[in-house]
Image (cartoon, rainbow, N blue to C red):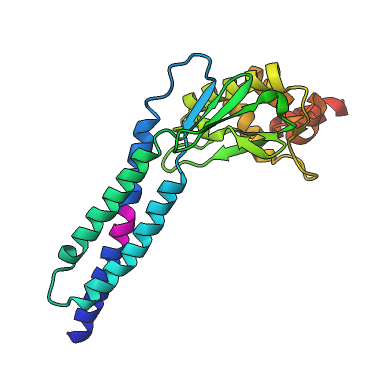
Amino acid sequence: MKWEAEKERWRNAGLAAALTVILPLLLALAVGSLRRSFGPRDPSVLLWWPEEMTTLIAFAISASIVVGLGTGIMVLARRNMAWWKVGRWSWAVTVLVMLAAVAASARAEVRVYADRIVISDEHGARETVPMASATGVGVWCDVIRRKRKADVATLDYAIHFPDRSVSLRPGLGSVSRDTARIWFHKIEALDREVLSALPHQSAGSAGHDVGCIRALRRELGEPDFTAARRMLGITEADLARYYAEPHEAWSRDTASSH
């Protein structure tokens, strides 16, 4: 019985410590999702997303971990007090700290225009990065894995500048087939109209993942996939030789044998 009581006390200490960290994280995620619903109304903004990991939010997460460890120790020390009574004040403190950090970080965002990227930090300071200063583009095939839903094949796209790289993937927001298609059309237009002359880093010596390219082709359909191939540097010959569906390769081999 004494051993069971000790196990229960350690279990409660771990639960109290975990909740001290998890509750503020859930708050940050919920507020971040809500904030994405209120994007800029400027029609010239092609893509936009809030910065979800500012220095203030990182500090709030670190503080919640430290407080969580302390809460677990307090639960172990206070044998005669219910664990939730020990932890409730810690939970309230860490949630309030995270709420303050999220509120103070509300101005941190990234706006992508056709000619520039504007990056704002939590203090409201803005930095403008001209598209004309871009040195190259990174674009890769990628499959977004989703629980209890079908995976979504899309691209990962980053613009390289002399002092940084800016990934446009955060502009996708919530992942669905519709949002992925809308995001793809925006980056395809930006790439074609503004960045097409820049060097495109699209694959290493091993080439693209065959399964990903096939999934992307099925996801986009032929017209959009043709645009994706242009960005990925896949020629018609490459498609037929390396990335054709098995039945296409079989049909081609059969035709060539006759």
Left/right of residue 241 with respect to residue 11 in the rendered view: right
Q: Is residue 111 above or below residue 158?
A: above
The answer to whether residue 243 is visible is yes
| Magenta highlight on residue 20 | yes
Give the quarter of the figure containing the C terminus.
top right
Residue located at (33% from left, 48% from top): 98
The answer to whether residue 226 is visible is no
Residue extending farthest bottom: 2
Give the quarter of the figure containing the N terminus.
bottom left
Residue located at (23% from left, 80% from top): 6
Residue located at (19% from left, 80% from top): 5
Q: Nearer the viewer, residue 226 or 155?
A: 155
- Identify the magenta region: 18-22
Q: Nearer the viewer, residue 121 or 43?
A: 121
Left/right of residue 70 with respect to residue 249 in the rendered view: left
Where residue 95 appears, as percent x and y from the top left, is 28, 50
* Among the 4 quarters of the image, the one containing residue 193: top right
Where residue 134 appears, as percent x and y from the top left, is 71, 29
Q: Nearer the viewer, residue 213 or 227?
A: 227
Residue located at (28% from left, 70% from top): 72
Where residue 49 appears, as percent x and y from the top left, is 48, 31
